[in-house]
Amino acid sequence: MEDPLAARPKESKTIVPGIALNLRTLIWKGQLHPGEHINQEAWAANLGVSHIPFREAVRILEAEGLLQVTANRGVTVTPVTEHEMQEWCLEFEGLLHVLLPLAAAKATPASLARARALMPELDQPRIAPDTHLEFWRILLEPCGMPRLMGLMEQLIWRLGRYFVADGKAVMASMREIRPNREDFLDAFEAGDAEGALQAMMTFIRKRIVVYLQLQERSR
């Protein structure tokens, strides 16, 4: 197993965020699978850290919805279920409903051009989470609401679990089905925040339906 903490900071203020970031990345890449049990002692030893900062990192990811901690099963990567995906959609839609009108009023030609340049990469099989995060930061950070952006970034990280199995195949196969990201960005650029919201949520929900169908067939 590759060591995701090859460079391990020892300072107390950075080691816990570093562990959390690397666990997020392992989940995004599918090296930690939805529903997989995490032996905290073994993983702390593998990362070369003590169990105390590792448990703190686990608590961070539990709050973000990436890990579940129960008395019976210990720590597991949050499974991908229909209920969880629908809950994700409601959270994502709620944040966009608040942020898109503010962001559309502050968009610039340069920021829109940067966002458009990233779109072809977003459905690629091995895309890094940083690209998805950058896309939404470009559009929404001008709102000046860092706490809401923090919630948005947590939701983007949760997307990684959907891409472990069939998620990327679904996105690639449905690239030409409308509405798509271009429709979303066209509405956003025109200042039509409601149209942009509807385009993005329809885009997402259509793909979730196909994703769940594929998951059901694979069981």
Image (tube, grey):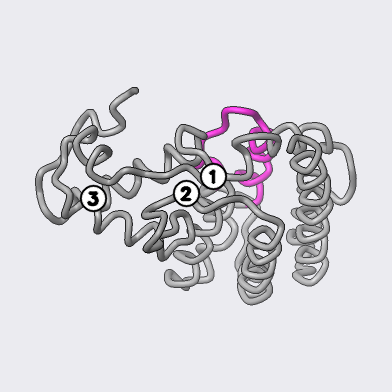
Q: Is 118 inside the magenta-drawn segment?
A: yes
User: Regarding mark 2 in the picture, which secondary structure is present there?
Assistant: strand
Of all residues, the one furthest to the top in this rendering is: 1
Residue picked out by circle 1: 34
Q: Quadrant of residue 136?
A: bottom right
For label 2, the residue is: 77
Circles 2 and 3: CB atoms closer than 8 Å: no
Q: Residue most toward the front?
A: 72
In the picture, residue 47 is in which quadrant?
A: top left
Is residue 99 in sight in this rendering?
yes
Q: Residue lying furthest left in this view?
A: 11
In terms of sequence position, does the residue under pointer 2 or pointer 1 come before the other?
1
Q: Which residue lies at the image location 42% right of the left edge and 37% below the top edge?
A: 26
Tell me the CA gap for discs 2 and 3. Answer: 15 Å
Quarter of the image for the N terminus: give it.
top left
Q: Helix or strand or loop: what does disc 3 sit on?
A: helix
In the rendered structure, which amino acid carries the disc numbered 1? Pro
Image coordinates for residue 54, horizontal then vertical, percent: 23, 50
* Amino acid residing under circle 3: Phe
Query: Which residues fall within the magenta stretch?
Result: 112-132
**133 versus 164 height, above or below:** below
Cβ–Cβ under 8 Å for marks 3 and 1: no
Q: CA distance from mark 3 to mark 1?
A: 19 Å
> What residue does disc 3 label?
54
